[in-house]
Amino acid sequence: MATRPGTLPRRVLGVDPGSSATGWAVIESSGSRARMVECGVVRPRGEGRAERLADLARRLDEVVVRLAPDAAAVESAFTARNPRSALSLAEARGVVLCVLGGRGLAVSSYSPAQVKSSVVGTGRAEKQQVVFMIVRLLALAEDPPRDAADAAAVALTHLHIQRFPGTR
């Protein structure tokens, strides 16, 4: 990506934590332009919960080391009706925060409504609307997986808020 003098590209890792699938996306921004560097979904493997969380940590750490983001943005947990689901999500989010903090990244959190509002224009947007906007905003040739699109939306929200302070 070509940059103007004095404008440095900024790489942000967006993460959408989940108990069975954690989406991630690295977005690089230079001025008002943004592009997808890479995205994916981690579906942790292992026999028990501890092994799956360790697998999530290992695989997310590999992404951080390989793609070297400057900052990270993580979707904050929503209030789940099922306490067991809420606990599983909190465990995954805790692992994500631990990996990112362990690599010395500054981490910001955004609510699902903030992310949807920033990318789609309404905090009550459907997942398919988020995917649609991510494809348009980043000029992607094809739809990314939904969890990865959500992660890209988190990263774009962070870039937008950093660029326009006070829009939180």
Image (cartoon, rainbow, N blue to C red):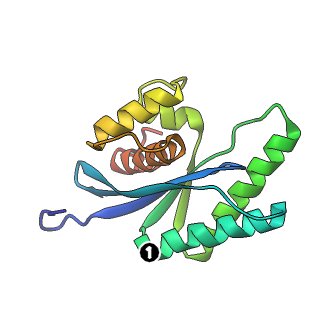
Number of residue marks: 1
Q: Quadrant of residue 120?
A: top left
Q: Quadrant of residue 31?
A: bottom left
* Residue at image coords 29%, 52%: 35
Element type at mark 1? helix
* Residue at image coords 65%, 63%: 97
Q: Quadrant of residue 119?
A: top left
As drawn, 3 above or below 82: below
As drawn, 97 above or below 162: below
Q: Tell me the residue that label 1 is attached to.
A: 66
The front one of 164 and 56 is 56
As drawn, 122 above or below 111: above
Residue 91: x %, y % from top left: 77, 56
The N terminus lies in which quarter of the figure? bottom left
Residue 37: x %, y % from top left: 34, 59
Residue 129: x %, y % from top left: 44, 27
Is residue 94 visible in the rendered image? The answer is yes
The front one of 38 and 120 is 38
Outermost residue, right side? 83
Q: In the shown orientation, is residue 23 left or right of residue 44?
A: left
Is residue 15 visible in the rendered image? The answer is no
What's the amino acid at mark 1?
Answer: Arg
- Near mark 1 (Cα within 10 A), the count class, few <14, some 14-19 or many ≥20, is few
Q: In the shown orientation, is residue 161 left or right of residue 8?
A: right
* Residue at image coords 44%, 47%: 152
Q: In the shown orientation, is residue 32 left or right of residue 144?
A: left
* Residue at image coords 44%, 55%: 39
Residue 21: x %, y % from top left: 64, 50
